[in-house]
């Protein structure tokens, strides 16, 4: 749902210029140095990128799911680290507060997340709780009117630089599965909270990912997302946030694929073999045609799902479909791009090689492809059983 087409067209053009004129020229340096220069982060703040999905009442732009999907497609046509820098704030790090936070929590944190004053992160994954997110070992034990949180989270985007952590911990030792998991808001500086050095990764350089260590971190009951009455309901909060994030991620897969199709076309036109541009070879044309067709299919699926969500429909299954199809599609396109670039595509500091490393992660986080296949199958069979 596009609420004001003219205003949204202006916003989209502004994002497109930022990506083209400021992000793309800095890609190679960000990849080599594994960091985004602070002046570029300041530009992100000035452009309002940290608050696109946060409601206007709390300082954000309040974009609809369809609008945010279109912005994500544009902003991800450069190195993935750029969008990851503010992505938590426009995704899972703020969505938990938007859907389940108390009014006091929203007013305390959402304006600062929207402005980029705070960087949020979503601390759910653990060494033994990845695809099985309910297997939480982090615990939060009552101590008077407070809770003491102890545990270790891993693979947390922006953990090394985050100011606000949404931490999931088991408050009911007897609870099984999703029961008894609670979401807490923990600020950096809380005694017992630490973030070790960021991981060295295959790709997505410039986007710090690391661990969150909690050693008897004391928080009041008011730190529970949604307040004390939401104790034990944290897994529901996590799933509500992740459903939206899976739609967001589909857009973040489509953007790189669009960029790679453009790069393939340019490379095929300029590279010559056997006395002619390789764009004249039918098998090269086939790779480009397949890639462009799959990009359009992913975009259509994403926008249809986003519109359904804006209409208030349950899109749990469709969100999984979007994430599955778009991430697998992006991987195929990246592989074809390396093929079209030939040996040059395997050399460091090359756009095809860089994206090939960056997009591999898309098939792992926010639910692996295999988990989404399982979810889609279960829901499809459940729907058939009720017909």
Image: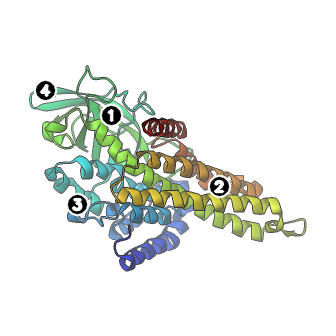
Say few, some or many: other residues with alpha carbon within 10 Å of mark 2 (under 14 / 14 to 19 / 20 or more).
many
State the residue at coordinates (80%, 58%).
283
CB-based contact (under 8 Å), mark 1 and mark 4: no
In terms of secondary structure, where does tag 2 sit?
Answer: helix
Residue 152 located left or right of residue 59: right
Whole-percent x, y for residue 95 in the image: 30, 51
Q: Which residue is mark 2?
A: 333
Q: Which residue is mark 3?
A: 111
> Which label lies toward us, 3 or 1?
3
Q: Which residue is mark 1?
A: 213
Q: Label 4 to label 2, Cα distance in Å? A: 53 Å
Q: Residue 143's mark?
A: 4
Q: Earlier in the sequence, mark 3 or mark 4?
A: 3
**331 is higher (above) or lower (below) than 150:** below
Q: Spot the residue most to the bottom.
A: 6
Q: Label 3 to label 1, Cα distance in Å? A: 27 Å
Q: Label 2 to label 1, Cα distance in Å? A: 37 Å
Q: Residue 271's mark?
A: none
- The quadrant the C terminus occupies is top left
Q: Label 2 to label 3, Cα distance in Å? A: 38 Å
State the residue at coordinates (42%, 37%).
386
Q: Spot the residue most to the right.
A: 274
**13 is higher (above) or lower (below) than 118:** below
């Amino acid at each position: 749902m596009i609420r004001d087409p003219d205003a949204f067209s202006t916003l989209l053009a502004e994002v497109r210029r930022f990506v083209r004129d400021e992000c793309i020229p800095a890609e190679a340096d960000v990849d080599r140095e594994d960091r985004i220069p602070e002046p570029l982060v300041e530009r992100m703040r000035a452009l309002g990128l940290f608050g696109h999905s946060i409601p206007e009442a709390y300082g954000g732009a309040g974009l609809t799911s369809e609008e945010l999907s279109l912005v994500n497609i544009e902003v991800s046509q450069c190195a993935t680290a750029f969008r990851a820098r503010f992505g938590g704030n426009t995704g899972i790090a703020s969505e938990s507060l938007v859907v389940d936070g108390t009014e006091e929590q929203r007013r305390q944190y959402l304006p600062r997340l929207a402005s980029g004053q705070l960087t949020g992160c979503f601390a759910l994954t653990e060494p033994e709780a990845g695809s099985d997110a309910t297997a939480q070992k982090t615990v939060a034990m009552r101590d008077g009117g407070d809770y003491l949180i102890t545990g270790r989270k891993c693979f947390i985007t922006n953990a090394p630089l985050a100011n606000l952590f949404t931490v999931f911990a088991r408050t009911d030792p007897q609870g099984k599965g999703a029961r008894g998991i609670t979401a807490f808001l923990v600020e950096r500086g809380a005694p017992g909270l630490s973030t070790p050095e960021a991981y060295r990764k295959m790709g997505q350089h410039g986007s710090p990912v690391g661990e969150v260590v909690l050693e008897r971190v004391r928080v009041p009951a008011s730190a529970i997302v949604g307040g004390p009455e939401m104790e034990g309901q944290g897994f529901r909060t996590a799933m509500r946030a992740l459903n939206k994030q899976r739609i967001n991620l589909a857009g973040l897969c489509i953007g790189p694929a669009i960029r790679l199709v453009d790069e393939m076309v340019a490379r095929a036109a300029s590279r010559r073999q056997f006395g002619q541009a390789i764009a004249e070879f039918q098998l090269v044309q086939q790779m480009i045609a397949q890639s462009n067709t799959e990009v359009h299919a992913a975009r259509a699926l994403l926008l249809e799902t986003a519109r359904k969500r804006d209409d208030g429909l349950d899109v749990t299954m469709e969100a999984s479909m979007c994430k599955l199809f778009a991430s697998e599609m992006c991987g195929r396109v990246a592989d074809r791009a390396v093929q079209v670039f030939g040996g040059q595509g395997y050399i460091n500091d090359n756009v095809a090689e860089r994206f090939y490393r960056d997009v591999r992660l898309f098939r792992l986080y926010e639910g692996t492809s295999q988990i989404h296949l399982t979810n889609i199958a279960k829901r499809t069979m459940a729907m058939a059983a009720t017909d």
